[in-house]
């Protein structure tokens, strides 16, 4: 560990020096200079190294996110099993972290040496951010070092001095308060709303809460874990500000003054939307790579005890991945919308231009992720006594997901030959399937697919639950929390309903007579608010199951058949409004997940268990499902990176610095699959090698500790 | 365990192989690498290549049954909403535009306007979101735009290259913008005007408006790209006669730097860099000199100016050819 810290710090220091030496003023109009390394294609070289760095980085930043949460669960419930699992997840990081740092250093050197003009320009603008970025790695390294190696020594023990605890709580409280004030704009520089929320929820509130928690060694260890994540998130945020700038450069105030501050460059249109998307992606990716580790261990296990442990680890990993996967389409939609707002040319190229077929491939991969995650859950129900009651639902959910999947990946038209066009009556569009290729149909089915996955989870959760404790007999807590969840759900939908009921169609360059389309959707959302209110009341009156069913049904009906069909009308009559229809669908779904999950947590609280979960009683096929998930998310991540980067077409910095190299073109999808496929195989080989190294280190440590014990015993005997 | 890992890697290779197969099949179906090729022949064939290639028009517009974009109006015959192809529709739209503005629009004028200023006359039900195609990132040249117009005319209408090459007064103002943008390396003069108003107008006059610290720029476009570019990036290398920088130090040691607007027996009057006038009485002057190496125009402008703003301002400046 110390070695890799030294190596990392060495690389970082050289990187900083290089950046400083190459920083030039922000205006760089001279011709671009391009170089090669031993005649290799520079573009492909950078692509491969960047992809490898991102894979390792995503894993290294994703795992601590859930390792800390699992540790907190174990700490609060005094369950050592969770603590052990959190430690096992963290142990996967040690070698991967060194590889990430080495690849990051390699990427920086390759970029600076092969693309000197471009990197000089970037370093001129981002020199402050780049140096801060490198310094943050010190924080990340030391907190990881302390978190991993301090696990045993910071376990349990006596409580800290009361005055010390009070001071920590005081500082934590002040930071929490400052965070809330910051969220509402009471202080801080001018910035985008999403950046403000990102800083509040991912930096300030966790930091304040972490300090607030400190009372003994274990809670201090958790605080270190939180710090580790804060450093990691800040690193992601900063790196994303560079790629965001390359896609949507900023540097002038809204008045058009030539200011061009570092902060403005950092807080560009896309840095935070990309960071949000990447954070969720890292969570899902980290979960699925850890799941693949558990699956391989399960397949190779020789004892029932090992199989039970790795089955459980795989289940938790998949659970985490799905928790990250469910909101990703929303974050992706938001990112896409911001890309479109930044440049309509780039936005159109994304969904309807060069990358439309890449998106079909992405739809295949994401659809497969949802389908296989559900399959894994359904397989898991076989180890739950009592879950047989719900087997009947599986075929319906399977049908819904398969049909939704098929619609989602249907293209609008196909590149056909003249004969084929003649065979379809002279049209490139299939008479029926052409509708499935349009956005209203795709928006409708993606929501249904997410809702079905959520339903699978609900069934899984209640698999072995028997007689329930009525909510009315659970004291005050549900009577407080469920209405709050109801208010949140109504707030999510209601604010948008209000906007649609009062909005002037001119904001979308539409005539006043198009207001009817806004109002129709606004009233539909108002009805959904009513449905949420009824759901809350029924839940508090011990009709929770019915209430959940009611709300999920109204949501499913509203987002899929109603708004799905209405979307086609909107597209015909008031096309720009279609984006708002999509937002209303997503908001209803989020509200549904929030409210139904909250009710569910009370509905089965204290319920009798029908039987004990039989961990380890899983088929080997289900473990291959976990592996497919890990491979598909890796391929998908590479594919999405290709789209995001490729949107700039022949620009290094969109609209500002043109790519004048030989590589200034959009590669084919086949080239993309070659590059991403190669990076995926190399990544998995490297990960397997690192896990093997980790296992060797562990077994050596175990042997050494046994030898020490034996020696001590011998000394004692003598 | 080694056996398990071996199985997993065979599995991995199969899945990656499948991924490669799908990528290859899609590439075979849709074509390979997409280089942004430009064409300079002003003809419908050239325009078709631009429309479906470098111009990226196809990402928003379909042409009848060709293409799949629905974001912007279909430019061919498509359903009840678009019964006429663009070649004929342009004539109808020109008539509507004539009625609306009282100006004698031709179908070519309508097409030039819809590219030169897309927000001028929107198709009902569509948002004002068309890109300025002669500005980055698309940066079509004037000939490429002419080719696209001829391609649109060829959709059910008569191609009139003569009308495209000899613009009317209505079209001419849009062509001026397009030519200026092209000369400035693809800058957007519309945005350049905003930047100019925010940063330059307080010192420079334009068509009777603005400050008098620097020279009037109403005719600067005639001086060419190189002159304007140097004047912005290295203001001290080019001086307009009458705008030399003077330095006056009074007996109290106070230093005034500005453009000399008046000098007589009573004293000297300067316009300072901030636009304010300063009068120094003859008796108070300790020293007066002309700084031949320094312009009053801020040198640091280049550090604050983004490259895009610079290109946009350049395009806007190139359009200033003395017309009020």
Image: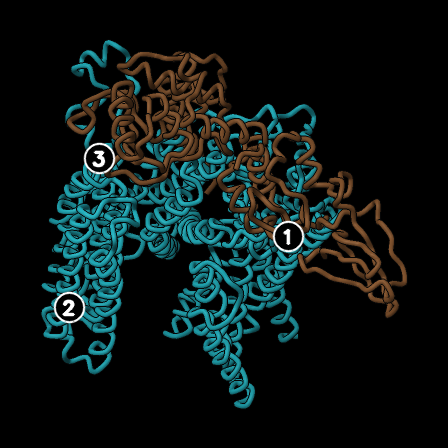
Q: Chain of mark 3?
A: A
Q: Are marks 2 and 1 on the same chain?
A: yes
The label nearer to you, 1 versus 3, is 1
Confirm or deny contact between disc 3 and disc 2 (CB under 8 A): no
> Is there any visible trace of residue A626 in the rendered image?
yes
Disc 3/disc 2 C-alpha distance (Å): 33 Å
> Is there any visible trace of residue A692 in the rendered image?
no
As drawn, the label of residue A407 is 3
The residue at which mark 2 appears reads as A533
Disc 1/disc 3 C-alpha distance (Å): 44 Å
Secondary structure under tag 3 reads helix
The residue at which mark 1 appears reads as A130
| Pick the front one: B254 or A197 | B254
* Quadrant including the C terminus of chain A: bottom right
Secondary structure under tag 1 reads helix
The label nearer to you, 3 versus 2, is 2
Horizontal and vertical percent position of residue B220: 63, 35
Left or right of A111 on screen, residue A587 = left
- Among the two numbered marks 3 and 2 on one chain, the one whose residue lies closer to the N terminus: 3
Badge 1 crowding class, 10 Å Cα cut-off, few under 14, some 14 to 19, many 20 or more, is many
Left or right of A326 on screen, residue A689 = right
Chain coloured cyan: which letter?
A: A
Horizontal and vertical percent position of residue B275: 66, 57
- Among the two numbered marks 2 and 1 on one chain, the one whose residue lies closer to the N terminus: 1
Q: Residue furthest front?
A: B265
Horizontal and vertical percent position of residue B126: 28, 38
Secondary structure under tag 2 reads helix
Chain B in the picture: what colour?
brown
Going 59% across and 53% down the picture, which residue do you hit?
A697
The colour scheme applied to this rendered structure is: by chain
């Amino acid at each position: 560990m110390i070695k890799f810290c030294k190596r990392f710090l060495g690389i970082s220091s050289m990187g900083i020096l290089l950046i400083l030496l190459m920083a030039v003023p922000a205006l760089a109009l001279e011709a671009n200079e391009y170089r090669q390394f031993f005649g290799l294609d520079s573009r492909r070289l950078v692509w491969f190294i960047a992809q490898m760095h991102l894979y390792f980085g995503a894993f290294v930043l994703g795992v601590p996110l859930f390792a800390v949460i699992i540790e907190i669960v174990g700490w609060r419930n005094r369950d050592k099993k969770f603590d052990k699992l959190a430690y096992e997840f963290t142990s996967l990081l040690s070698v991967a972290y060194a590889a990430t740092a080495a690849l990051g250093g390699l990427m920086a050197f390759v970029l600076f040496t092969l693309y000197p003009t471009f990197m000089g320009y970037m370093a001129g603008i981002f020199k402050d951010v780049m140096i801060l970025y490198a310094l943050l790695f010190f924080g990340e390294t030391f907190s990881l070092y302390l978190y991993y190696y301090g696990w045993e020594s910071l376990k349990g023990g006596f409580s800290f001095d009361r005055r010390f605890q009070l001071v920590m709580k005081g500082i934590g409280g002040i930071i929490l308060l400052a965070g809330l004030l910051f969220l509402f704009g009471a202080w801080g520089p001018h910035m985008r709303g999403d950046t403000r929320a990102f800083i509040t929820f991912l930096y300030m509130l966790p930091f304040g809460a972490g300090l607030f928690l400190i009372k003994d060694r274990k809670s201090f260890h958790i605080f270190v874990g939180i710090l580790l994540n804060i450093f990691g998130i800040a690193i992601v945020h900063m790196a994303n500000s560079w790629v965001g700038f390359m896609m949507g450069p900023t540097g002038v105030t809204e008045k058009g003054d030539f200011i061009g501050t570092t902060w403005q460059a950092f807080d560009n249109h896309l840095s935070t939307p990309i960071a949000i998307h990447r954070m969720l992606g890292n969570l899902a990716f980290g979960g699925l790579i850890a799941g693949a580790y558990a699956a391989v261990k399960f397949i190779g296990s020789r004892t029932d005890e090992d199989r039970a442990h790795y089955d459980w680890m795989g289940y938790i990993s998949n659970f985490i991945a799905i928790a990250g996967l469910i909101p990703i389409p929303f974050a992706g939609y938001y990112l896409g919308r911001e890309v479109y707002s930044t440049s309509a040319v780039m936005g159109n190229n994304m969904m309807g231009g060069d990358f439309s077929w890449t998106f079909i491939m992405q739809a295949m991969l994401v659809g497969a992720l949802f389908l296989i995650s559900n399959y894994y859950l359904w397989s898991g129900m076989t180890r739950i006594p009592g879950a047989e009651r719900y087997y009947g639902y599986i075929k319906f959910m399977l049908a819904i997901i398969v049909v939704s999947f098929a619609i989602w990946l249907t293209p609008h038209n196909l590149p056909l030959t003249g004969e084929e066009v003649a065979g379809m009556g002279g049209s490139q569009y299939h008479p029926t399937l052409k509708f499935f290729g349009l956005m209203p149909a795709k928006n409708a089915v993606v929501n249904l697919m997410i809702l079905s996955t959520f339903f699978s989870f609900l069934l899984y959760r209640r698999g072995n639950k028997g007689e329930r404790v009525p909510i009315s007999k659970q004291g005050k807590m549900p009577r407080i929390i469920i209405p709050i969840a109801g208010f949140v759900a109504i707030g999510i939908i209601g604010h948008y309903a209000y906007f649609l009921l009062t909005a002037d169609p001119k904001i979308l360059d539409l005539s006043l007579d198009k207001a009817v389309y806004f109002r129709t959707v606004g009233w539909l959302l108002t009805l959904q608010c009513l449905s949420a209110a009824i759901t809350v009341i029924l839940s508090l009156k011990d009709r929770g199951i019915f209430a959940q069913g009611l709300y999920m049904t109204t949501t499913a009906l509203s987002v899929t058949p109603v708004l799905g069909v209405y979307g086609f009308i909107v597209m015909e009559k008031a096309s720009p409004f279609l984006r708002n229809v999509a937002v209303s669908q997503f908001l209803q779904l989020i509200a549904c997940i929030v409210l139904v999950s909250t009710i569910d947590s009370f509905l089965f609280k204290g319920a009798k268990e029908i039987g004990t979960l039989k961990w380890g009683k899983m088929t080997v096929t289900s473990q291959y499902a976990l592996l497919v998930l890990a491979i598909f998310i890796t391929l998908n991540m590479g594919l999405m990176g290709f789209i995001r980067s490729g949107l700039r077409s022949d620009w290094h910095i969109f609209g500002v610095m043109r790519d004048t190299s030989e590589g200034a073109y959009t590669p084919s999808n086949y080239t993309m699959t070659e590059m991403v496929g190669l990076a995926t195989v190399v990544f998995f080989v490297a990960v397997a090698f690192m896990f093997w190294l980790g296992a060797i280190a562990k077994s050596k440590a175990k042997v050494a500790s046994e030898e020490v014990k034996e020696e001590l015993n011998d000394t004692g005997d003598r | 365990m080694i056996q398990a890992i071996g199985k997993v890697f065979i599995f991995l290779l199969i899945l990656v192989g499948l991924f490669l197969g799908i990528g290859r099949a899609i590439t075979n179906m849709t074509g390979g690498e997409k280089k942004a090729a430009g064409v300079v022949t002003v003809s419908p064939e050239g325009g078709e290549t631009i429309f479906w290639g470098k111009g990226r028009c196809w990402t928003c517009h379909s042409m009848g049954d060709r293409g799949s974009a629905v974001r912007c109006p279909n430019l061919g015959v498509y359903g009840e909403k678009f019964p006429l192809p663009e070649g004929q529709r342009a004539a109808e739209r020109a008539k509507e535009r004539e009625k609306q503005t009282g100006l004698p629009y031709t179908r070519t004028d309508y097409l030039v306007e819809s590219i030169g200023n897309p927000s001028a006359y929107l198709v009902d039900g569509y948002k004002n979101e068309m890109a300025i195609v002669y500005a980055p990132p698309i940066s079509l040249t004037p000939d490429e735009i002419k080719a696209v117009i001829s391609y649109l005319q060829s959709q059910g209408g008569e191609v009139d290259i003569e009308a495209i090459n000899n613009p009317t007064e209505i079209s001419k103002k849009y062509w001026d913008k397009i030519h200026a943008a092209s000369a400035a390396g693809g800058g957007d003069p519309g945005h350049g005007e905003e930047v100019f108003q925010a940063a330059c107008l307080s010192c420079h006059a334009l068509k009777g408006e603005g400050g008098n610290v620097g020279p009037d720029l109403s005719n600067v476009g005639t001086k060419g790209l190189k002159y304007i570019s140097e004047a912005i990036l290295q203001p001290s290398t080019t001086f307009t006669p009458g705008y030399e920088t003077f330095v006056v130090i009074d007996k109290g040691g106070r230093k005034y730097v500005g453009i000399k607007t008046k000098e007589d027996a009573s004293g000297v009057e300067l316009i300072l860099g901030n636009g304010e006038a300063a009068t120094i009485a003859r008796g108070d002057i300790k020293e007066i000199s002309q700084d031949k190496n320094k312009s009053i125009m801020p040198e640091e402008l280049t550090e604050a100016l983004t490259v895009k703003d610079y290109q946009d301002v350049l395009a806007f400046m190139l359009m200033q050819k003395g017309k009020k």
